[in-house]
Amino acid sequence: MEQPMKILIISDTHRKNENYFMLLERLKPLDMVIHCGDAEGSEYAISEAADCPVQIVLGNNDFFSALPKEVELNIGGYRVLVTHGHTHYVSMGNEQLKMDARMRGVDVVMYGHTHRPCLDIEEDLVTLNPGSLSYPRQEGHRPSYALMEIDEAGEASFRIEYL
């Protein structure tokens, strides 16, 4: 029996945090928040508001920041790599990122940068981009985020949600 978990994954908020604060109220309690980069100086506000552990990685617009370029985490029984993605050329597709993730032996890779949600579930790897809560670029331009939930059996499920 595992402890069920609910993890909020966001990206590319670019200092425009109203949707994030609203979402926190709607989704609480959360076990973790993961931000895939481009918080642009609002790391403290994002972390303070969460009421749970927060992981934030460095995005291509996070100038003069001490944030890590990427982090590897254990979430439940899953090995998770969090990166912004720009150093993996995700603007041209996520194949390079998937290759790098597989070489590192992770189960899940989370990234941002494109402002477009993406969820690829393959046998050996889950690739997830929550899109952007602030400046969505996909068709329809609805702000998006992702949820990772782990059930009592330790199984993870992933979904992309829209505001």
Image: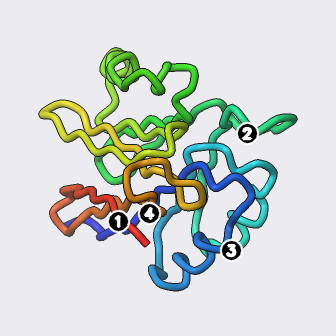
Nearer the observer: mark 3 or 4; the answer is 4
Does label 2 or label 3 sit earlier along the sequence? 3
* Residue 14: percent from left, percent from top: 70, 52
Nearer the observer: mark 1 or 2; the answer is 1
Residue at 28% of width from left, 45% of height from top?
119
Give the amino acid at mark 4.
Answer: Arg
Does label 3 or label 4 sit earlier along the sequence? 3
* Disc number placed over residue 142 in the picture, else none: 4
Q: In what quadrant of the picture does the C terminus appear?
A: bottom left
* Residue 9: percent from left, percent from top: 46, 56
Q: Nearer the viewer, residue 150 or 93?
A: 93
Give the amino acid at mark 3.
Answer: Ala
User: CB under 8 Å between callouts 2 and 3?
Assistant: no
* Disc 2 target residue: 67
- The answer to whether residue 162 of the structure is visible from this angle is yes
What SS does tag 4 mark? loop
The Cα atoms of the two marked residues, 3 and 4, are separated by 23 Å
Apparent side of residue 54 relative to residue 1 in the rendered image (left or right): right
The Cα atoms of the two marked residues, 1 and 3, are separated by 20 Å
Apparent side of residue 134 relative to residue 3 in the rendered image (left or right): right
User: CB under 8 Å between callouts 1 and 3?
Assistant: no
Does label 4 or label 2 sit earlier along the sequence? 2
Give the amino acid at mark 2.
Answer: Leu
- The answer to whether residue 34 of the structure is visible from this angle is no
